Image (tube, grey):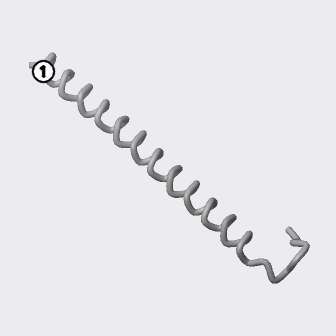
Amino acid sequence: MSNSNPNDTKLEQQRSDAATAALKDQTENNHSADTEAAADLIADNVESTKEDK
């Protein structure tokens, strides 16, 4: 991407901040989804164990 003013770093910094925030949000959302999926699997395993006894 080219800027009309190559010395305008403020716009580039804003883009960088936005990209960092988006990646952080995506990572947190993925972690939350993975945690919930793991909790569901554990709950299913507990139920299966109870049924087997």
Which image quarter: residue 16? Answer: bottom right
- How far from the left and from the top, in percent, is residue 15? 69, 64
Q: Determine the residue located farthest toward the left in the rendered image.
A: 53
**Closer to the camera in the image, 13 or 33:** 13
- How far from the left and from the top, in percent, is residue 31? 41, 48
Which image quarter: residue 12? Answer: bottom right
Left or right position of 29 against 14: left
- How would you rate the neighbour count of disc 1 (Cα within 10 Å): few for under 14, some for 14-19, many for 20 or more? few
Q: Determine the residue located farthest toward the top in the rendered image.
A: 51
Q: Determine the residue located farthest toward the bottom in the rendered image.
A: 7
Left or right position of 22 against 32: right
- The total of numbered circles placed on residues is 1
Residue displayed at 85% across by 80% down: 6
Label 1 belongs to which residue? 50
**Closer to the camera in the image, 35 or 4:** 4
Residue displayed at 57% across by 63% down: 20
Residue 24 to residue 1: above or below: above
Residue 1 to residue 51: above or below: below
Q: Determine the residue located farthest toward the right in the rendered image.
A: 4
Left or right position of 52 against 4: left
Q: Quadrant of the N terminus?
A: bottom right
Which image quarter: residue 49? Answer: top left
Going by the numbered disc 1, the residue's amino acid type is: Lys
Residue displayed at 23% across by 28% down: 43
Left or right position of 5 against 31: right
- How far from the left and from the top, in percent, is residue 14? 66, 66
Q: Quadrant of the C terminus?
A: top left
Residue displayed at 62% across by 60% down: 18
Which structural element holds mark 1? helix
